[in-house]
Image (cartoon, rainbow, N blue to C red):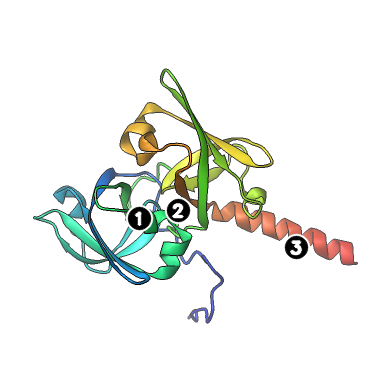
Amino acid sequence: MMTPEKSPPPYHNRGFMFTGIVQRQVQVQQVRDQGTFRQLTLTVPAELLAQLERGASIAVNGTCLTATDFDSQAGWVQFDVIDETLQKTNLGALAQGCWVNFERSLSFGREIGGHLVSGHVHGTVSIRAVEKQGLNCRIELALPDAFRPYVLSKGFISVDGISLTVGDVTDHSFYLHLIPETLSVTTLGKRQAGDLVNIELDQQTITIVDTVERVLALRQTR
């Protein structure tokens, strides 16, 4: 019998819950702030709330939130967002009428079309540029020093809950190449330079990079 961990590190992945395939853009119906605590209500189509239960996990802009109340017939779901989440994600910048990416948690037997995503956002980065030519779209995002070892060309990354493949990577930026479907289904089609997006790094990449660095460090000390 496994014993629970006493103090998991920040953003520890207890089990993947999402695919990074956004089901729908939905709109913020209401925001209620109480100091550093926020209650967020989203307007959601009834079909996306089917068989929902209180306590269920839902990714909102890639942030795993717990459904605290809902009405599937009226078409809304509510979440409590604490200060830690507001500081680490872009959910603190949401206002009534904003659009967000929505994904219900992964269920057994469902196709994984993206990559496995936990909904534990590592931080936000700013969009530096959006370039559109015909049906092609390239987005440049800032690359913080702390993320640089884990953002690799052709690797996976979750941006506002969207499973994407990284394009070119430079010392201070990385690029995304988006198809029209992604721009249509997700909020990336509305994003502009200067906007902040949530980033979840690929956990497998983190594990491999950190393990290799530890092994090399041990060899150097021998």
Question: Residue 134: x and y, percent?
Answer: 42, 17
Q: Residues within 10 Å of mark 1 (few under 14, many from 20)?
A: many
Please state which amino acid type lies under the numbered disc 2: Val
The picture places residue 53, in percent across and down from the top left corner, at 21, 65
Number of residue marks: 3
Q: How far apart are marks 2 and 3 (CA)?
A: 25 Å
Sequence-first tag of 1 and 2: 1
List the single residue furthest toward the front.
35
Question: Where does the image place residue 24, in percent across and percent down from the top left?
Answer: 28, 43
In this figure, which residue is indicated by the disc labeled 3?
A: 214
Amino acid under disc 3: Arg
The circle drawn on residue 59 is: 1
Q: Is residue 91 above or below residue 184?
A: below
User: Which numbered disc, 3 or 1, marks the residue closer to the eye?
Assistant: 1
Query: Mark 2 — residue?
Result: 117
Q: Is residue 212 left or right of residue 65?
A: right
The residue depicted at 23 percent of the width and 62 percent of the height is 78
Badge 2 or badge 3: first in the primary sequence: 2
Gap in angstroms between the C-alphas marked 3 and 1:
32 Å
Mark positioned earlier in the residue sequence (3 or 1)? 1
Q: Depth check: 8 or 86 in front?
A: 86
**Element type at mark 2:** loop
The reply to whether discs 1 and 2 touch (Cβ–Cβ < 8 Å) is yes
Residue at left 36%, top 36%? 190
Identity of the residue furthest to the left in this view = 73
Q: Would you call the spot at circle 3 few (<14 residues within 10 Å), some (14-19), or many (20 or more)? A: few
